[in-house]
Amino acid sequence: MKLYPEGANRKKQLMLGKNVAIGDNKFLIIAGPCAVEGEEQLTEIAKFTSKTNNIVLRGGVYKPRTSPHDFQGMGLEGAKLLSRIGKQYDLPVITEITDSRQIEFLDQLVDIYQIGSRNMYNYDLLKEVGKTDKPVLLKRGMAATIKEWLLAASYIELNGNNKIILCERGIRTFETYTRNTLDLSAVVAIKNISHYPIVVDPSHATGRKEMIIPLAKAALIAGADGVMVEVHNDPKQALCDGQQSLNLDEYGKLVSELEFLTKIMKDYE
Ligand code: PEP
Ligand code: MN
């Protein structure tokens, strides 16, 4: 089932910034806090992570929280901060878009749009980001089949935008020990039946920080084009998802372990 056979107009490598790309052996790291919380927090994280090769800075400003009582994100002010700090450290930035009306101002401020798991079925939003020329990271719906996920990607592509990155972020199963269940087989499936690059998000897939490094390495070995991880300068104080965020030292360990693995894999090619 080749849903989307390779077309002549499809570049193997998708450029995301001046020196940042995904695909064709360019392994991408997307790292940053679940939510932008303020200048000091984001600066500390950006400063540290900017030493990584091929990295995009993430930070949510519109947080689709399960509970309306939880922190909802800094909104436009947060997006401005993300943009400014991204520029300061020369990092492309990604944030989740939750409403097509946000395009009007986010278009100036971010480099990549993220469509969250809860919005994978929001076809009107998919069509609208499809009309922009920004890369779109499309997270898998938490109960979506691979086919539904690829059809959601088609909503974006049919509106003119083929700069799509898929993100496996775990699916709902009967298991409760982890927040979701990471479906690494989806990485192999996506590689076999589509032309899209795919990243794996072990933070939201598991909800547990001790699982991030092992599963990020497993994602690399399974053939993923990158990983997305939540990183916080002070996870215990995080306003959102601190339990699944690496601190800066742990992030450094993740990067060096991924680099080591990449080198071993190259040596065996
Ligand atoms: C996120 O990445 O901030 C997020 C909310 O993830 P998901 O949409 O996968 O739940
Ligand atoms: Mn989060």
Image (cartoon, grey):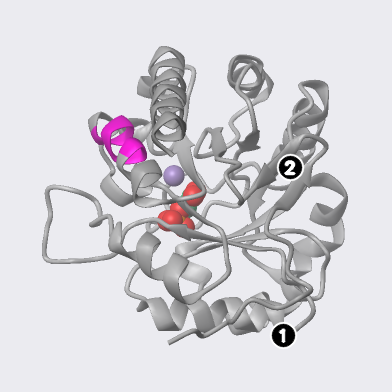
Residue 122 visible in the snapshot: yes
Q: Earlier in the sequence, mark 2 or mark 1?
A: 2
Residue 87 image-quadrant placement: top right
Q: Secondary structure at mark 1?
A: loop
Magenta segment:
211-217
Q: The disc labelled 2 sits on which kind of residue?
A: Ala
- Foreground label between 2 and 1: 1
Give the spatial CA distance, label 2 vs label 1: 28 Å
Q: Which residue is mark 1?
A: 158
The residue shown at (76%, 75%) is 8
Decide: few, some or many residues near mark 2? Use Cα within 10 Å; few <14, some 14-19, many ≥20: many
The residue shown at (57%, 82%) is 4
Give the percent coordinates (x, y) of residue 217: 34, 36
Q: Quadrant of the C terminus?
A: top left
Give the percent coordinates (x, y) of residue 175: 11, 58
Q: The disc labelled 1 sits on which kind of residue?
A: Leu
Viewer-closest of 129 and 160:
160
The residue shown at (79%, 73%) is 9
Residue 81 image-quadrant placement: top right
Label drawn at residue 79: 2
